[in-house]
Image (cartoon, rainbow, N blue to C red):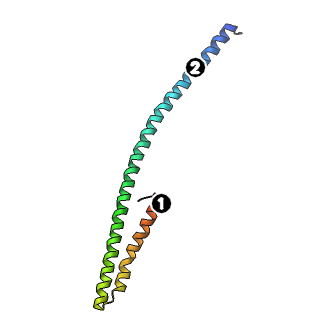
Amino acid sequence: MKQSKTEKAVFAKLSTQKVELSNLSILKDLAKDSVRFNRAMLEHNTELVNKFKELSSSVRASEQIVNDFNRMKGDLESAAKELGVDVSGDIKQLSSPIMEMEQTIRDMKKRWGVK
C-alpha cells in the first residue's frame, strides 16, 4: 500500500518531534550529570585546599625544627670546643635526618609552591 503525501508529511513531522524529544531527554541527563560532577569537583577542591594547608603547616614546622637544630648544633660545637671535647662524629650522625628533612622541604617548596 502506498502512502499519501499527507501521511508521509505526518510521519516526517512525528519523526522530527520524536528526535527533538529524544534530544531533550539527553539534555536533561547531561544537566543532571553536570550538577553531580560539579559537586564532586567542588568537594575535591575543598579536600585539596585543606591538604595543601596541612602541607604548608608541616613545612613551616619542619623549617622550625631545622632552624632549632642548627642553632643548638652551633651552641654545642662552641661549648664542646671550649671544653676540648670532640662531638663532630655525633653531630654528623645527628645531622643526617636534618639534612634529609631540608631536602624534603626544598622539594615540597619547588613541587607545590609551598611558602
Residue at horizontal 57%, vertical 21%? 20
Residue at horizontal 42%, vertical 59%? 114
Give the label, 1 or 2, closer to the camera. 1
Residue 76 sits above or below residue 111 on the image? below
Q: Is residue 86 left or right of residue 5?
A: left
CA separation in Å, label 1 and label 2: 54 Å
Three-letter amino acid code at disc 1? Answer: Arg
Which image quarter holds the N terminus?
Answer: top right
Q: Nearer the viewer, residue 7 or 43?
A: 43
| Residue 62 spot, x, y in % from top left | 35, 66
Dot placed on the residue nearer the N-terminal end, 1 or 2: 2
Residue 37 sits above or below residue 61 on the image? above
Marker count (numbered)? 2
Contact (Cβ within 8 Å) of mark 1 with mark 2: no
Residue at horizontal 63%, vertical 11%? 10
Q: Give the quadrant of residue 108.
A: bottom left
Q: Is residue 91 left or right of residue 107?
A: left
Residue 112 sits above or below residue 39 on the image? below
Residue at horizontal 37%, vertical 77%? 95
* Mark carried by residue 111: 1
| Residue 94 spot, x, y in % from top left | 35, 78
| Residue 3 spot, x, y in % from top left | 69, 10
Secondary structure of residue under mark 1: helix
Three-letter amino acid code at disc 2? Answer: Lys
Mark 1: few/some/many CA within 10 Å (<14, 14-19, 20+): few
Residue lying farthest to the bottom in this orientation: 84
Question: Can you identify the residue that label 2 sits on?
Answer: 18
| Residue 92 spot, x, y in % from top left | 38, 81
* Mark carried by residue 92: none
